[in-house]
Amino acid sequence: MTIEIRPLFSAESGSIPLDVCFDLSQVEIGGYCPLTQPVRFVGGVYNRSGVVTLEGTATNDYTAPCDRCGEPATETVTCEIAYVLVESLSGEERDDYIVVDNGLLDLEDVVCTDVL
């Protein structure tokens, strides 16, 4: 899911509320696909005094084989996601900043990376 956030960069304030689900059931880790149910992200993109941020919570059921018996074990996992969004960086890269090319944010990529 790509979100157009260019208008937030040129404003003093504003927000884009988000409540979306992503099907990441085909993502494979260690030979299995642990995200059998959709991942839900609730939050938004916010501009507060010229600082644009992505903030929210991703919730999903994570299924993996039990280390002891090998049977599938499922646990609900919640992940807080927070980044400062910038159009460019001058200097070192930072883990808490995301460079948004052409004003388009790939939310699914951000959520997938943070959840896994």
Image (tube, rainbow, N blue to C red):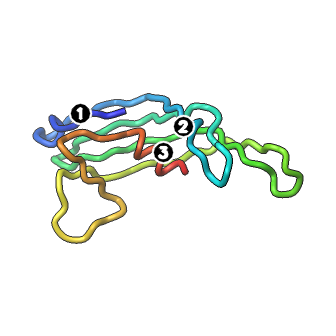
The residue at 19%/70% (across/down) is 91
Instruction: Identify the disc placed on residue 4.
Output: 1
Q: Say which of marks 2 and 1 sits in front.
A: 2
The label number, if any, that marks residue 112 in the structure image = 3
Tally the numbered discs.
Answer: 3
Q: Measure the C-alpha gap from mark 2 to mark 3.
A: 7 Å
Side of 25 where 109 appears, left or right: left
- Element marked by disc 1: strand
Q: Residues within 10 Å of mark 3 (few under 14, many from 20)?
A: some
Where does the image place residue 24, in percent across and percent down from the top left? 54, 37
Mark 2 residue type: Leu
Q: Are marks 2 and 3 in contact (CB under 8 Å)?
A: yes
Residue in the foreground of this view, choosing between 6 and 26:
26
Nearest the viewer among 82 and 29 is: 29
On the image, the x and y values in percent for residue 25 come to: 59, 36
What's the residue type where badge 1 is placed?
Glu
Using residue 51 as the reference point, say whether residue 56 is left or right of it: right
Identify the residue position indicated by label 2 in the image: 24
CA–CA distance in space, label 2 to label 1: 22 Å
Q: Amino acid at mark 3?
A: Cys
Q: CA distance from mark 1 to mark 3?
A: 19 Å
Res. 115 mark: none
Residue 10 pos. (x, y %): 10, 40
